[in-house]
Image (tube, rainbow, N blue to C red):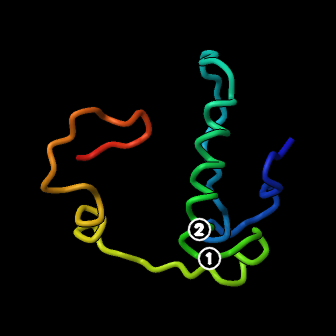
């Protein structure tokens, strides 16, 4: 069956790539990942000053930044003594 309901679409410009199907070895409980996501969501809501996800939808504003801006927004001019498990500085 067509997983993304695109088998009848004739125009290649209208096809949307959706990644690949595959399996990964079991890496443990999903609880740690959920904990990280919840922490990020709480932090974002604090930055926005909102109390609910629906308020976040109304108030959030996305801003596109350059790759130089991404580098500048990361930690710099500091010697990191312990890498965080979910953060990389390149």
* Residue nearest the viewer, comparing 16 with 67: 67
Locate residue 18, reporting x and y percent.
65, 51
Q: Residue at x 28, y 32 (%)?
A: 82
- Which disc number belongs to residue 32? none
Q: Is residue 42 found left or right of 82 in the rendered image?
A: right
Q: Is residue 35 found left or right of 54 in the rendered image?
A: left
Quadrant in which the N terminus appears: top right
Q: Residue lying furthest right in this view?
A: 1
Within 10 Å of disc 2 (Cα), the crowding (few <14, some 14-19, many 20+) is few
Where residue 7 sits, quadrant-wise, is bottom right
* Residue nearest the viewer, comparing 76 with 23: 76
Instruction: Please tell me whether mark 1 sits on a helix, a strand or a loop.
Output: loop
Locate residue 74, reporting x and y percent.
28, 58
- State the CA–CA distance, disc 1 to disc 2: 5 Å
* Residue nearest the viewer, comparing 23 with 54: 54
Instruction: Please tell me whether mark 2 sits on a helix, a strand or a loop.
Output: helix
Q: Residue at x 75, y 78 (%)?
A: 55
Do the CB atoms of the residues marked 1 and 2 lie less than 8 Å apart? Answer: yes
Residue named by callout 1: 49
Within 10 Å of disc 1 (Cα), the crowding (few <14, some 14-19, many 20+) is few
Q: Residue at x 80, y 46 (%)?
A: 3
Above or below 17: residue 21:
above
Where residue 54 sits, quadrant-wise, is bottom right
Above or below 50: residue 87:
above
Residue named by callout 2: 46
Q: Residue at x 58, y 76 (%)?
A: 48
Q: How many marks?
A: 2
Locate residue 11, reporting x and y percent.
67, 70
Above or below 27: residue 85:
below
């Amino acid at each position: 069956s067509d997983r993304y309901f695109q088998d009848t679409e004739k125009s290649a410009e209208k096809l949307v790539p959706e990644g690949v199907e595959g399996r990964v070895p079991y890496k443990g409980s999903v609880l740690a990942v959920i904990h990280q996501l919840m922490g990020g969501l709480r932090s974002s809501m604090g930055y926005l000053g909102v109390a609910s996800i629906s308020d976040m939808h109304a108030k959030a504003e996305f801003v596109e930044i350059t790759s130089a801006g991404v580098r500048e927004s990361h930690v710099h001019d500091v010697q990191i003594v312990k890498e965080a498990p979910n953060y990389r500085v390149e």
